Structure formats: structure tokens, C-alpha cells
């Protein structure tokens, strides 16, 4: 029985992201817009009703942290204001379950676009490898998905964005032969696939939006991953 209004939608949206992350099809339809160290950011140019809705995909490999840790800090509403530099406010309106809540956040005005806000459900999920053989993929995933309304959503004049965002992580560990059994952060690597489909709502010139995306997404991903490394370096590993 559906536990809450969005139960079915959440399972469908998450399943879709897992399917795409597993494929990781970065074919020539994706244009590389930022390439720095292990971080590569791609876009596709797409417009809906004359509005730039470019899908964005980033792949990043970070040593010393796990997919569970990346997803924990990306999902946890309590720490969002600590790493998300483009937010003016963020609040939880509702809890569907311990891993799923509804967030309302107002983004800072990103010159020269107008101020925007987002209302979305966010879920963190561990997807262990289902086939019995050991080396199947094991994902941690967070998905942020817009909802049209919520009775606790404050009235505002801001433009509402529509987004479907997912952070999918896979952790790899060096074989036990390379260490005497005790796994330290030197032996772990996290492969992050970040997919953002954001319809910015209210019109803005395509050239302006594309320049903002090109500047803001790499900055955001660098700042977030650095935050996770800083938060976890002296803590026990979350596998
Ligand atoms: C005119 C559209 C403005 C605009 C609104 C919103 C967002 C945006 C929404 C959600 C998420 S997230 O990954 O779900 C983390 C939770 O906040 C990241 C980004 C991006 C842009 C575009 C400007 C780009 C940008 C990218 C990254 C961070 C901030 N802004």
C-alpha cells in the first residue's frame, strides 16, 4: 500500500536514475564544458518553450570518501546551508519517512537572473548489488525531485524552478592484499555521477543561462566534494 502520496513516483524516478547511472552513456551528444582533474562536466543543449533546460551531467572521482558519505552530506537537510553557497534559505516542510523529506529552498539571486526557489522531495537510498557475485555494482543515491505544491509551502513571488537531480555514487576499495586487512581512507575511492535537469522557470536569455550554468555547476561540485572531505577526514568511515 502506498505509504504516502509520492511513494510510487519516488520509486519510479529513482529506478530511472539508477538505470542511467549504471549505463553512464557519455556519448558524443554530451558537450564537455568543464574538465578539471578528475571532474568532468557535460551538458546537452535543450530548450523547452524557448527556455534553456540543458541537462547537465558530471562525473567525478574522489579519493578518501565513500558513496555513503557523499550521499549522506548531499541529502542531509541539516547541513545544506553549510555547503550550498547559492542558497539564501532551506527548510524541511514534511517527512515522508526517515530517508525522504520535502524541502523548500530559496536560491540567492544569480546575476543577472531573477531569484528562484525550489520545492522538492529528497530521498537517500542504498542500492546494494543484487546479484550474489561479489563484484556487482553497489550504489548510494540521492534524488531531489520537484513537486508542484505542498500545504506548508510559503507563498512567495519568486520564480519556481522545476528540477530532477540525482547524485549516484559507487565506492571502490583497494584489494585487501594492498593493506593488512584494516581499510583506511587511503584505500577508498568514490565515483560520483551527478545529473541535473533544471527548468529555471521564468524566461532568461539562453546565453546568460548557459554562462551561469557553466560557471556555477563546477564551482558547486568542487565546493560540495571538498566539504565532504573536510567533514569526514577525522571521522570513522561510513561504508
Ligand atoms: C537560473 C537557474 C538558477 C538555478 C537554480 C537552482 C539550481 C540548482 C538546484 C538544485 C541543485 S541540487 O544539486 O539539488 C542541490 C540542492 O540545492 C543544484 C542547483 C541551479 C541553477 C543554475 C544557476 C545554476 C546553478 C548551478 C549550481 C548551483 C547553483 N546554481
Image (tube, grey):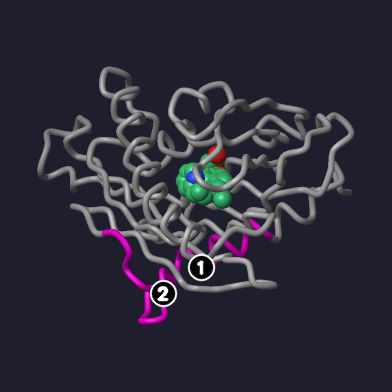
- Give the quarter of the figure containing the C terminus: top left
Residue at which label 1 appears: 20
Mark yes or no: residue 116 visible. Answer: yes
Asked where in the image residue 96 lies, by quadrant, the reply is: top right
Residue 186 horizontal side relative to residue 106, left or right: left
What residue do we see at 31% from left, 52% from top?
A: 60
Q: Position of residue 203 (x, y in %)?
A: 65, 59
What residue do we see at 27% from left, 53% from top?
A: 39
| Element assignment for label 2 | loop
Residue 154 horizontal side relative to residue 212, left or right: right
The magenta stretch is 13-34
Indicate yes or no: mark 1 CB to ligand 1 under 8 Å. Answer: no
Q: Which mark is residue 25?
A: 2
Q: Position of residue 94 (x, y in %)?
A: 78, 29
Residue 29, above or below 193: below
Residue 207 horizontal side relative to residue 35, left or right: right
Amino acid at each position: 500500500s502506498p505509504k504516502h502520496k509520492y511513494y510510487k513516483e519516488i520509486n519510479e524516478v529513482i529506478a530511472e536514475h539508477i538505470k542511467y547511472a549504471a549505463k553512464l552513456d557519455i556519448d558524443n551528444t554530451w558537450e564537455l564544458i568543464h574538465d578539471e582533474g578528475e571532474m568532468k562536466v557535460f551538458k546537452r543543449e535543450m530548450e523547452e518553450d524557448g527556455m534553456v533546460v540543458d541537462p547537465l551531467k558530471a562525473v567525478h572521482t574522489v579519493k578518501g570518501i565513500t558513496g555513503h558519505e557523499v550521499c549522506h552530506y548531499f541529502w542531509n537537510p541539516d547541513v545544506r546551508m553549510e555547503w550550498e553557497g547559492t542558497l539564501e534559505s532551506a527548510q524541511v516542510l514534511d517527512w515522508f519517512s526517515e530517508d525522504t523529506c520535502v524541502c523548500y529552498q530559496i536560491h540567492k539571486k544569480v546575476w543577472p537572473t531573477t531569484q528562484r526557489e525550489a520545492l522538492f522531495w529528497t530521498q537517500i537510498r542504498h542500492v546494494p548489488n543484487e546479484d550474489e557475485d561479489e563484484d556487482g555494482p553497489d550504489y548510494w543515491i540521492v534524488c531531489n525531485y520537484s513537486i508542484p505544491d505542498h500545504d506548508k509551502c510559503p507563498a512567495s513571488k519568486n520564480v519556481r524552478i522545476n528540477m530532477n537531480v540525482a547524485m549516484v555514487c559507487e565506492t571502490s576499495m583497494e584489494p585487501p592484499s594492498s593493506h593488512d586487512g584494516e581499510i583506511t581512507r587511503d584505500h577508498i575511492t568514490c565515483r560520483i555521477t551527478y545529473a541535473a535537469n533544471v527548468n529555471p522557470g521564468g524566461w532568461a536569455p539562453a546565453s546568460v543561462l548557459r554562462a551561469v550554468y557553466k560557471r556555477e555547476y563546477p564551482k558547486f561540485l568542487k565546493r560540495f566534494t571538498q566539504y565532504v572531505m573536510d567533514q569526514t577526514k577525522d571521522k570513522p568511515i561510513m561504508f
